[in-house]
Amino acid sequence: MAVNDTIADMLTRIRNANLARHQTTEVPSTKMTRSIAKVLQDEGFIMGYEEAGEGVKRNLVISLKYKGKGKRPIINALKRISKPGFRVYSNRKDLPRVLGGIGVAIISTSSGIMTDREARRQGLGGEVLCYVW
C-alpha cells in the first residue's frame, strides 16, 4: 500500500514498536526517513539503524532503546507537526522549544534535517517536521 506521508508512517511505526516493547522496527527507506533516523540516533533516542533489502524495496531497520529493568522506552512521545495538508514553517527566531528544551523538534532546513538546537545555532529556519521527547 502506498503511503502519502512517509514521516507520519515512520513515527507511527516507532510509536507502536515502543508500546509493544519490540527491539527493532522496519520503516520504508527514503532520504527523509534516513535523515530523521540519523537525528534520532545522534540525539540518543534510538540505538541505531541500518538499511536492509535491495532496489526499490529497501527498508530501514531501526533498533529501539529502552532503560531500566522495566524496559521503559526512551522515546515517550513522537508528534507529527507539519502535515502534507498543513505545512508548518518557522523562521530562526520562532523555532519551537519542546518541553523547555527536554524534547527535540526535528526541522527540515535548507542545510538538511536537524534538531531545533542545531538550526538555532546555525541561524536557520525551516519546516517543523515533528517533536520527540
Image (cartoon, helix red, strand yellow):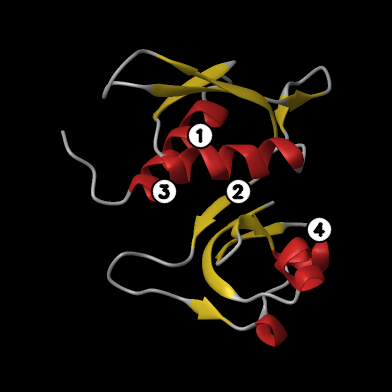
Mark 4, other Cα within 10 Å: few <14 / some 14–19 / many ≥20:
few
Amino acid of disc 1: Ile
Q: Which mark is residue 102?
A: 4
Provide the residue designation for mark 3: 7
Q: Which mark is residue 127?
A: none
Provide the residue designation for mark 2: 77
Nearer the camera: disc 2 or disc 1: 1
Q: Residue at x 54, y 68 (%)?
A: 128
Residues at badges 3 and 1 in contact (C-beta under 8 Å)?
A: no
**Which is more N-terminal, label 2 or label 3?**
3
Q: CA distance from mark 3 to mark 1?
A: 11 Å
Q: Position of residue 55 (x, y in %)?
A: 29, 19
Q: Position of residue 119 (x, y in %)?
A: 71, 67
Provide the residue designation for mark 1: 14
Q: CA distance from mark 2 to mark 1?
A: 10 Å
Residues at badges 1 and 4 in contact (C-beta under 8 Å)?
A: no
Q: CA distance from mark 3 to mark 4?
A: 22 Å
